[in-house]
Image (tube, grey):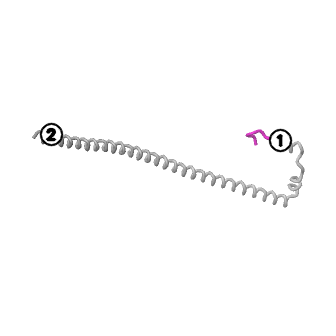
Amino acid sequence: MIQARLIIIGVVIIAFMGLGLVAYHYKVAAKDALVARDAAIRDRDLAVATNKANEAARLKAEADAAKADKLVSALQDEIDTANQSTLDMATKLSEIRANNAKVNDFLGTPIPDDLLRLYNEPKAAGHH
């Protein structure tokens, strides 16, 4: 009888130890799951922040490109206007020279050396 009681007590102790081991295993698994969940949340938050930053950078790049396109277009318009003005002036001057001998003679006069030197002197930075 004592042997039977000892065997039953041993079986109960082993059962409680098994139950404790299973409980410990689930506790460790739950803790690992919490750590994994927290890491996933951090990764998600980082990805969201990175996506927001990338979207902001993309929008800024698009705005900068649009601004650059406008500036290039405006500059091209100014160049076209300057070229047309130069062409118009050259055409008018050619017509005046062809129709007015005095203007043609005046424009054919050589420029004095003193005036030529003014145009041939090196210019300081910022001076035109």
Q: Is residue 25 left or right of residue 10?
A: right
Q: Is residue 37 left or right of residue 127?
A: left
- Which dot marks residue 121? 1
The residue lying toward the viewer, choosing from 115 and 24, is 24
> What kind of element bears circle 1?
loop
Do labels 2 and 1 touch, CB within 8 Å? no
The residue lying toward the viewer, choosing from 99 and 26, is 26
Q: Residue at x 63, y 53 (%)?
A: 72
- Which dot marks residue 68? none
Please give the residue where the numbered disc 2 appears in the rendered image.
Answer: 6
Q: Residue at x 86, y 42 (%)?
A: 117
Where 24 falls versus 77 (above or below)? above
Where 9 falls versus 70 (above or below)? above
Q: Amino acid at mark 2?
A: Leu
Quadrant in the picture for the C terminus: top right
| For discs 2 and 1, the disc positioned in front in the rendered view | 2
Q: Which residues are magenta?
A: 120-128
Q: Give the overall secondary structure of the magenta segment.
A: loop
